Image (spheres, rainbow, N blue to C red):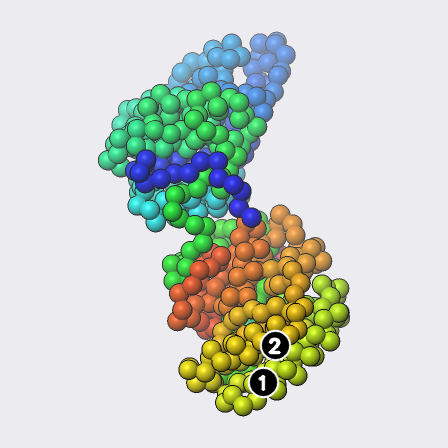
Amino acid sequence: MPPSPVVTLSKDDFDAVIFDMDGVVTRTAHVHAAAWKKMFDAFLEGYAARTGSSFKPFDVAKEYTRYVDGKPRLDGVRDFLASRGIELPEGGPDDSPEQDTVYGLGERKNAFFNVQLEKKGAKRYDSTVELIHKLKKLGIKSAIISASRNARAVLKSAGVSELFDTRVDGLDAQELGIAGKPAPDVFLAAAEKLGVEPQRAVVVEDAQSGVEAGRAGGFGLVIGVDRADQADELARFAHVVVSDLAEVAVDGVTDETTTGELPSALDHFNHIEIRLKSKRPAVFLDYDGTLTPIVERPEDARITEEMRQTVRDLAKLCTVAIVSGRDLQDVRHLAGIEDIYYAGSHGFDIAGPAGKKMEYQSGTDYLPDLDRAEKELEKRLECLDGVQVERKKFAIAVHFRRVAEEKHLEVEENVDQVLAQVKRLRKTGGKKIFELRPDIDWDKGKALDYLLEKLDLNKRDVLPFYLGDDLTDEDAMRELKERGIGITVRDDEDRRTQAAYALEDTCEVRIFLQKLADLLEERAQESE
Ligand SMILES: O=P(O)(O)OC[C@H]1O[C@H](O[C@H]2O[C@H](CO)[C@@H](O)[C@H](O)[C@H]2O)[C@H](O)[C@@H](O)[C@@H]1O
């Protein structure tokens, strides 16, 4: 469930939102903090030895947020040194990182930061990216600002360079000769570049100096994002403080997008690669419409040898499971891939490699209801041309793909009547299909969650993927919204989805899986 909104942005009130970068859009605050600490500690230790004073290390929790965070690099050096009563020569832009001058210490911090950025890569806050997409839908512009002169490299590393209408970073500020935060100049420069009045713009900031700058600039709304347990300090200047931008709603835009609007998982594979940088994937695959094209008759949905081999290759490199609406035995037989996990009957029936049964949400109590419904459906629907009743262990599918269009309603009425007779089942839909399954709160999403737990994959260093094409796959996409990547396989119908990316067809699914396998293979070779 998304958190309840703390604030709602509306087109009536605002024309633009200006986002600070570090800590709001990108997760680099900790990389900066670590680089500052490494630099200051080395300097302070040497300074203590030279002056005979005692060495007191840089306190990230207190001193980073108070003196350094959000400010231009040199101001950070100056303000911190002043807080300790240390005076250093100013130096100049040509100073080397080894020199104990304000410029030299700034260069040293920068060198540490770049090493870390190269090593770890910047990450982005998905909730912020989602908010920007929602603002775009409403025609509200966005800008990114940063005091950092490395901002362009950070944005690129996090895969968000193209997201904003404009940018004012440390290099721009230098060129424009404008002051850093807490002066409002960078925000005002961004508003001017966007062509909006400050009163009609929102500032989003996680640094104390940043909310102060937003307020000083006369911006219509200043949102403080509390990432460092400093809500009270931020609230001194911010109109509102949130803990994450998932708490900011956009008037008239829901959380869901449609399948047609989604970016391609292949075109954006570099973004996915970035998210996988320090994680390993676990891949969950739907069968019909994802691994095989949709065909007239369910029994003809055969996986190609090429697809089978790709899934096998991937399964050698990471955990792979097929999560299907089909009967467990049926989907295992059709897929014909050993050594992977299978969840059949929409997750009611789960088995590990070599058919090893796993615990699952039991539908066994409902078997008599399903038997009864099956008989009733067969009896009622036998005269309707083209209907196919497919019994799975824990569900019954009524296919009407081959039924004349004008008879579809009659099929549904019969299914509804059977449902009325056998009360402990519920009806769900899919592609030219009605299904009856046990009326239990269990679906592909719950099965996915269960598998993640059971296989010890519910961890920070695991990035789960779910690929599916149908409505029933949306339960799994929803489950991964905050902790993984949902990829929908498009068809002719544009419908709402919880997925983050799309693929056009099963051919693209195979290419995507192959790319993933290649990436993992490369990584494995690199680490040898
Ligand atoms: O979760 P899935 O693996 O995608 O299974 C969903 C249903 O797939 C099958 O039906 C669908 O595919 C058939 C073959 O392409 C097609 O003829 C039918 O119209 C589709 O609905 C399967 O037969 C069902 O049991 C699954 O529930």
Q: For residue 456, what is the image quadrant?
A: bottom right
Give the image quarter of residue 54: top right
Q: Residue tagged by mark 1?
A: 380
- The residue lying at 44 percent from left, 17 percent from top is 78
Residue located at (49% from left, 80% from top): 410
Q: Mark 2, residues whose alpha carbon is within 10 Å: few (<14), some, or many (≥20)?
A: many
Is 32 placed above or below 502 here? above
Q: Is residue 78 left or right of residue 218?
A: right
Of 40 and 259, nearer the camera is 259
> On screen, 63 above or below 457?
above
Say if mark 2 contacts mark 1, CB within 8 Å. Answer: yes
Q: Looking at the picture, does residue 398 appear above or below residue 358?
A: below
| Amino acid of disc 2 | Val
Q: Residue at x 50, y 89 (%)?
A: 385
Residue occupied by mark 2: 418
Which residue is at the front of the view, 402 or 88? 402
